[in-house]
Image: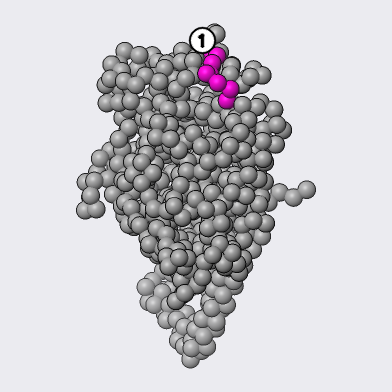
C-alpha cells in the first residue's frame, strides 16, 4: 500500500507507487495553477489522445450534418443582415447628406480645333479665346443679371455728354511674373489694337477713341461722338507692356509670347503638348491656378485647367464616353453612349443672340410691306424650332428680354394663316394650282442660309411651310467661308436670309437696323434686311447718345414700335449654348447669360472635379 505524508506547511504534494510500471505523476502548485499536466511516458499520451478524439469527435460525427446546416443558415443570415444594413445606409445617405465640392484636381475640357494665338488682341478661334479668357483678366465682365462688374478695373464714370470716360484700375494687381499692372499696360493695349500694323481684329471697336494717362492707375477716354454704350467695349483683356513694348509691331502677331503667354487671370499658362494619335494631331494645353490672383474675392477650386484640342467632334465625344474629359461644348449628342443619367449632365445656357428671317427690303417683291407681313403670319415658328437641340426661346422683336427698354410685341407676331391669305387677296393675288399668283406671276422667293447648321434645318421647315401655304421658295445654301465676304460685305443673298445676330449686352442695335449700315462704305454693313426708316434711325441715334437710363429706355421702346409696324424681318428664336459635364463634375452655372461662348468661364472659380458627402446641417 502506498504511504501518504501530508504536511500543511509543505509546498508540494507527492504520490508514490510501489509498482514502478505505473506512470509517475508529479503535480506542483505551479502546475495546478495553470492546469497543465505533464505525462511521463508516450503510451499514456497516446491513450489520453485516443480517448479524447473518441469522446469529442468520433462519437459526434453522426451529428455533423446538422451542425453544418446550422452554420450555413447562420452565415446566410449574417450575410443578409450585413448586406441589408449596407444597402439601407447607401439608400438613406442622400437624405441626410449632400455632395460638397472641394479643392483640387484637374478639369479637362475637350474642344475641336488647333492652337494658333493666345494673345487676347488676336484670339479669334474657340480654343484660342478659351485659353486667353482664363490666362488674361478683363477690365470688366457681365454677371448673371447682365450687369457690368469690375475685374481689373475699380470704376468707370462718364460726363453728361457721354464723350469723356474715366477709368480707374484696382491697385496691387500683378501679372503672372509678379510685375504690377498699371495704366501703362492699358494704354499700351489700346494703342496696339488701334495701330493698323498690328493687324488686330479688334481695331474697329477702338477707332476714334483717344486714351490718356492721368496717373499710374487712372486713364481718360475721349470719344469723337456721344456714345452711352461705350462701357461694353471695356470687357477687354489687357496685355503686358513690359514684355511686348520692344517687339516689332509688324511681327507682333507671330511673337513667341502668343504661344507662351504671361497674363493676369485666375490661371497661368504652363505648357502646350503636341500629341500624334490615330485620330490626327491633338494638343494638350495645361494651365495652373494663379497663386497671386486677387482680382476677385475667391480663388478657383481646381488646381489645373487642361484643354484637349482634337480634330473633330466625333473624337471629342469618344474621349467623353471614355471618361477622359470633365466637360465639353463640342459633343455629338446622339453619339453619347453613357446610359445612366448620373453619368453625365447637360446645361443649356442663354445666348444674347437672335436668329431672324431677314426680308431684303430692297427686293422687288419684298419692298412691299404687305408681302413682308404675309410671310410673318404664314409661318408657324414653334413648329420650325421644335426639332432643334435644346430648349429654344422664341423671340418677338429686335431686342431680347435682358435688354433695358425691351418691349414684347406678341400681338403682331403670331401664326395667322387666314389673315395672311386675306392680305394677299386684298393685294390682288389669287391662288391657282396651289400657288398664289398675280398678273400670271407666281409669288416666288429665294431663301439663303448657311449649310450644315441649325439654320439649314429651320430653312427647310420654312420652305415646306411656305410651299404648303402657296408661296414658291428656292433654297440657297452657302458654305461657312462664304458668309463674311458674300453675305456681310456684299449682301449677296436671295430675297430672304436666315441668320443669327449677336445682339450684345446693351440695347444699342444701331449696327443692325440703322439705314447708314446698308451703305457699302460703312464699317460693318450689318443691316442685313436693308431696312430704311427715318423714325427708326432717329430713335436709335437718340438711344446711344443719352446717358439717363430712363431716356434711353423710352427711345428704344419707340424704335421697337416702329420696327414692329414695318415688318423688316421675322424674329425666330434665340439659340442656346449646350454644355456637357461628366458625372458629378461641376461646370458653368445654368443661370449664366452669354454674349459669346467663352463667357461660360465667368464663374470658373466655382467649377470643380472633386466631391465629398457632408451631413446636412439643420437649425
Q: Nearer the viewer, residue 488 or 146?
A: 488
Q: How is the image coloured?
A: one colour
In the picture shown, does residue 517 fall above or below 379? Answer: above
Q: Name the outermost residue toward the front.
A: 439
Q: Name the outermost residue toward the bottom.
A: 62
* Disc 1 packing (10 Å; few <14; some 14–19; many ≥20): some
In the picture shown, does residue 418 fall above or below 67? Answer: above
Q: Is residue 378 visible?
A: no
Q: Residue at point 50% right, 56% down?
A: 346
Q: Is residue 63 visible?
A: yes
Q: Residue at point 54% right, 8% down?
A: 215
Asked whether 223 falls inside the magenta stretch, the response is yes
Percent position of residue 143, x then y: 59, 37
The answer to whether residue 17 is left or right of residue 411 is left
Image quadrant assignment for residue 459: bottom left
Label 1 secondary element: strand
In the picture shown, does residue 21 fall above or below 331? Answer: below
Q: Nearer the viewer, residue 375 or 613?
A: 375
Q: Nearer the viewer, residue 510 or 500?
A: 510
Percent position of residue 389, x then y: 48, 60
Determine which residue is flagged by label 1.
213
The answer to whether residue 25 is left or right of residue 148 is left
Which residues are drawn in magenta?
Answer: 219-227
Percent position of residue 503, x then y: 53, 41
The answer to whether residue 478 is left or right of residue 581 is left
Q: Residue at point 39% right, 53% down?
A: 494
Image quadrant assignment for residue 147: top right
Asked whether 41 falls inside the magenta stretch, the response is no
Amino acid at each position: 500500500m502506498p504511504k501518504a505524508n501530508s504536511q500543511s506547511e509543505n509546498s508540494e504534494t507527492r504520490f508514490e507507487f510501489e509498482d514502478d510500471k505505473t506512470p509517475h505523476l508529479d503535480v506542483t502548485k505551479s502546475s495546478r495553477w495553470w492546469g497543465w499536466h505533464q505525462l511521463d511516458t508516450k503510451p499514456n499520451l497516446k491513450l489520453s489522445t485516443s480517448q479524447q478524439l473518441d469522446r469529442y469527435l468520433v462519437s459526434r460525427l453522426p451529428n455533423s450534418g446538422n451542425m453544418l446546416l446550422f452554420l450555413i443558415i447562420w452565415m446566410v443570415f449574417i450575410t443578409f443582415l450585413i448586406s441589408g444594413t449596407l444597402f439601407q445606409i447607401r439608400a438613406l445617405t442622400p437624405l441626410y447628406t449632400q455632395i460638397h465640392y472641394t479643392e483640387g484636381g484637374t478639369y479637362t475640357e475637350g474642344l475641336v480645333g488647333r492652337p494658333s494665338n493666345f494673345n487676347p488682341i488676336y484670339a479669334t478661334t474657340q480654343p484660342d479665346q478659351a485659353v486667353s479668357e482664363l490666362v488674361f483678366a478683363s477690365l470688366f465682365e457681365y454677371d448673371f443679371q447682365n450687369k457690368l462688374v469690375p475685374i481689373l478695373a475699380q470704376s468707370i464714370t462718364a460726363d453728361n455728354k457721354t464723350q469723356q470716360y474715366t477709368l480707374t484700375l484696382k491697385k496691387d494687381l500683378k501679372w503672372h511674373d509678379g510685375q504690377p499692372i498699371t495704366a501703362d499696360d492699358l494704354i499700351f493695349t489700346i494703342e496696339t489694337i488701334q495701330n493698323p500694323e498690328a493687324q488686330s481684329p479688334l481695331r474697329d471697336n477702338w477707332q476714334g477713341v483717344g486714351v490718356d494717362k492721368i496717373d499710374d492707375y487712372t486713364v481718360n477716354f475721349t470719344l469723337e461722338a456721344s456714345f452711352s454704350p461705350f462701357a461694353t467695349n471695356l470687357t477687354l483683356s489687357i496685355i503686358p507692356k513690359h514684355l511686348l513694348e520692344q517687339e516689332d509691331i509688324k511681327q507682333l502677331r507671330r511673337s513667341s509670347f502668343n504661344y507662351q503667354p504671361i497674363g493676369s487671370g485666375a490661371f497661368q499658362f504652363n505648357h502646350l503638348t503636341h500629341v500624334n494619335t490615330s485620330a490626327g494631331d491633338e494638343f494638350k494645353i495645361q494651365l495652373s491656378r494663379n497663386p497671386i490672383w486677387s482680382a476677385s474675392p475667391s480663388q478657383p477650386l481646381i488646381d489645373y485647367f487642361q484643354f484637349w484640342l482634337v480634330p473633330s467632334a466625333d473624337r471629342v465625344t469618344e474621349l467623353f464616353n471614355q471618361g477622359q474629359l470633365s466637360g465639353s461644348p463640342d459633343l455629338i449628342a446622339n453619339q453619347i453612349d453613357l446610359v445612366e443619367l448620373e453619368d453625365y449632365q447637360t446645361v443649356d445656357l442663354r445666348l444674347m443672340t437672335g436668329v431672324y428671317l431677314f426680308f431684303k427690303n430692297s427686293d422687288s417683291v419684298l419692298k412691299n410691306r404687305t408681302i413682308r407681313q404675309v410671310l410673318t403670319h404664314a409661318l408657324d415658328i414653334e413648329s420650325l424650332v421644335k426639332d432643334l437641340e435644346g430648349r429654344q426661346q422664341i423671340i418677338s422683336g429686335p431686342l431680347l428680354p435682358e435688354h433695358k427698354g425691351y418691349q414684347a410685341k406678341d400681338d403682331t407676331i403670331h401664326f395667322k394663316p387666314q389673315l395672311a391669305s386675306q392680305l394677299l387677296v386684298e393685294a390682288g393675288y389669287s391662288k391657282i394650282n396651289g400657288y398664289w399668283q398675280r398678273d400670271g406671276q407666281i409669288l416666288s422667293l429665294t431663301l439663303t442660309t448657311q449649310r450644315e447648321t441649325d439654320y439649314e434645318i429651320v430653312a427647310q421647315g420654312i420652305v415646306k411651310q411656305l410651299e404648303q401655304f402657296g408661296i414658291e421658295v428656292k433654297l440657297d445654301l452657302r458654305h461657312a467661308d462664304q458668309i463674311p465676304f458674300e453675305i456681310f460685305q456684299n449682301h449677296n443673298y436671295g430675297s430672304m436670309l436666315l441668320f443669327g445676330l449677336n445682339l450684345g449686352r446693351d440695347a444699342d442695335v444701331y449696327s443692325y437696323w440703322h439705314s447708314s449700315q446698308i451703305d457699302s462704305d460703312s464699317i460693318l454693313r450689318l443691316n442685313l434686311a436693308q431696312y430704311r426708316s427715318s423714325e427708326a434711325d432717329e430713335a436709335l441715334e437718340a438711344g446711344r447718345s443719352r446717358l439717363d437710363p430712363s431716356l434711353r429706355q423710352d427711345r428704344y421702346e419707340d424704335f421697337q414700335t416702329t420696327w414692329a409696324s414695318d415688318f423688316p424681318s421675322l424674329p425666330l428664336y434665340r439659340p442656346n449654348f449646350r454644355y456637357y459635364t461628366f458625372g458629378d463634375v461641376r461646370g458653368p452655372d445654368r443661370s449664366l447669360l452669354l454674349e459669346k461662348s467663352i463667357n461660360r468661364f465667368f464663374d470658373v472659380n466655382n467649377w470643380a472635379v472633386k466631391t465629398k458627402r457632408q451631413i446636412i446641417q439643420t437649425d
